[in-house]
Amino acid sequence: MENTDWKNQPDEADFGAARTYLSLLVEPSEAKALAKALEHDEQIVRYRAVDLLRASGLPLADAENPEVARDLSKVKFGTRLSPVLLVRGEPLVIADGYHRVCASVHLGAHETVPCRIVTRRT
């Protein structure tokens, strides 16, 4: 099993990607507020990758998926991955980083993933 090395903070582009994805699920103004909250909350927490998939209800993408394969290749060559961005709710929303979560599951059942998480206010 490879050891996944993670960056200390998400990439700047991750917040824009999260906002775009969230705008498909909620009103654009709420998506913007959630992305801004993710950007300003600098606390990093770790969760098991399999638990993130379970809480989100998303399936595990195959290791052959192009995005998952890219992340697995990054790990193999020592490139650090960006933490995942989450929105707590029913279900959990992986706002950015789904493929990194899937890559982590393929690397090991107990692989933990660094995350930033905010709660959606309804």
Image (cartoon, rainbow, N blue to C red):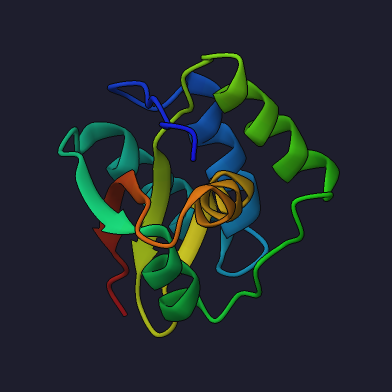
- The residue shown at (56%, 44%) is 100
The part of the image, by quadrant, that contains residue 77 is top right
Decide if residue 110 is on the left or right side of residue 43.
right
If the image is split into quadrants, where does the C terminus sit?
A: bottom left
Residue at (84% x, 41% y) in the render: 66
x then y, percent, for residue 38: 32, 43
Please tell me whether residue 122 is drawn above or below residue 65 in the rendered image: below
- Residue 73 in percent (x, y) is at 69, 26
Q: Is residue 49 above or below residue 39?
A: below
Q: Nearer the viewer, residue 117 or 30?
A: 117
* Residue 6, picture quadrant: top left
Coordinates of residue 7 in the picture (x, y in percent): 36, 21
| In the displayed structure image, the side of residue 97 where residue 30 appears, left or right | left
Q: Is residue 3 above or below residue 23?
A: above
Q: With 107 as the anchor, is 46 left or right in this view?
A: left
Figure quadrant of residue 84: top left
